[in-house]
Image (cartoon, grey):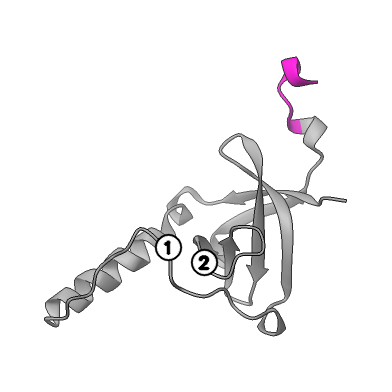
Amino acid sequence: ADSYITLAPRQAAIGTWARMRQLNAESEAKKGSNFEVKDSFDHPMPKPIHCLKDADLKVFLQNQFQARRIALSAEMLYLSWPQGESVVDLIPNNEIIDVSRARPEDWARPEDK
């Protein structure tokens, strides 16, 4: 059976991964490196042995439940595509306000119930 969760990060945490990648690119450019920010993410997900939790879940994002692989370390919550090996987003744990179990029917639009 699928597991469903909702995440409530602080607004400032949204886009952390994109900002980190942009800062890295700017830093490399100042060094004269030819570093390029790519559309695809190439940072690997942490190994399950290094995580407090590693699972495929349905996460409530952008007003709908979406399948994601999550990896929770002591410092970060990493998100990937289901069974993915590359990070697509991350949220520092100190920026997460709440994580809750969810039931899809509680989040359905009235016309979808």
What's under tag 2, amino acid-wise? Answer: Val
Instruction: Give the secondary structure at mark 2.
Output: loop
Badge 2 density bin: few <14, some 14–19, many ≥20, Cα 10 Å: many
Circle count: 2
Does dot 1 land on a helix, a strand or a loop?
Answer: helix
Q: Label 2, label 1: how many angstroms apart (C-alpha)?
A: 9 Å
Q: x and y percent of residue 90 in the render?
A: 52, 63
Amino acid of disc 1: Trp
Disc on res. 87: 2
Name the residue that disc number 1 marks.
17
- Callouts 2 and 1 close, C-beta under 8 Å: yes
Camera-side residue of 10 and 1: 1
Q: Looking at the figure, which quarter contains the C terminus? A: top right
Q: Residue at x 79, y 44 (%)?
A: 102
Q: Is residue 49 left or right of residue 61?
A: right
Where in the figure is residue 54, as x and y percent of width and height? 72, 70
Whether 106 is drawn above or below 27: the answer is above
- What residue is rendered at 40% in x and 61% in y? 40
